[in-house]
Amino acid sequence: MYFNILKHMDYIHYENTDDNNSFVIEYQNNRELQYLCDKDKILIFDSPYHIDYDGIIHLSNTSDNEVIEVPFNAFIKLQNCKNDLYYFSNSTPILDEHIELSNSLLNPLSIHKKCHLLGGPQGYITPTFFHNFHRKFLYVSSGSIQISLQPLNSTHIINKDIATLHYSVGNCDRSVNENIFLKSGQIIFIPHNYIYNIEYCEPINVVYDITSHSISSFCLNIKDILLNSIQKNNVIVKQDIDRIIEDNNTMVQSDNEEDIDSNRRAYVSA
């Protein structure tokens, strides 16, 4: 456990960061994939399964902090409406509904498994992200994307958004990025010690962000995970209180209207 935590915290040390650190592999089985992922290299391969999801999405965008429930087809249509917004879901039940893909990608000992839905209009470039998970896979379900990556180093300043658990990096030298183009049906594995951004290349782009922790990475990040859970619970409680207050106000307004109407009828009768 101690050495796993040290490895997760360590930076990648390359003599030349311009070296090609990505590899296209043939997917064989989960065991071989986990072995290759432990090499801390960028891996690109074809998805062994296809996802067809049409459920409800808890969707957010870059313009505000609101979260709305929308059907999947609305998520697709929104990409045609705005060309300056990046969309992401808080969570989707992909790992339960498509257990075959989950089992083919994630380590059997993984915990805190998550799947987020990402999308954006053609030409939109996301901020530069850093992830603290043990495993991160991006599956391009439709459209195409270009990912720019580079190893994390000690000079990078990580900005944490506890509400969404999104970690971004503002001070990165883009000249050392490695650019990788992914088309529909492909998956990329991003090691935890890389920073990356995504450029959406087609009018409609759907990307599944599949992540999981190991026991060691979960212990290392448990503080932020707990803070995120507390904040989400506070948001739920606030929404419940606001709904109760709104219902009470509606009832009071209705009662007042009934009293006024009753008084009016009594006045007319008199």
Image (tube, rainbow, N blue to C red):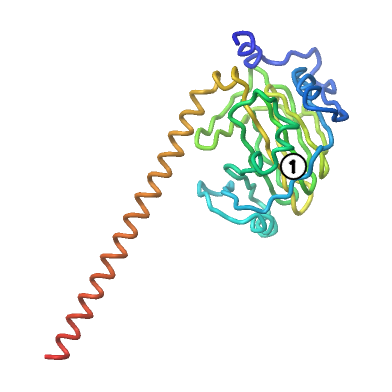
Q: Residue at x 58, y 46 (%)?
A: 62
Residue at the disc numbered 1: 199
Q: Which type of secondary structure does the marked residue at label 1 adopt? A: strand
Mark 1 belongs to which amino acid?
Answer: Glu
Residue 187 horizontal side relative to residue 115, left or right: right
Residue 156 spot, x, y in % from top left: 63, 22
Asked where in the image residue 132 lies, by quadrant, the reply is top right
Asked where in the image residue 93 lies, by quadrant, the reply is top right
Residue 236 spot, x, y in % from top left: 42, 44
| 45, 11: nearer the viewer | 45
Q: Residue at x 34, y 58 (%)?
A: 246
Residue 156 horizontal side relative to residue 44, left or right: left
Relative to 128, residue 270 above or below: below
Relative to 29, residue 266 above or below: below
Residue 118 spot, x, y in % from top left: 67, 44
Quadrant location of the C terminus in the rendered image? bottom left
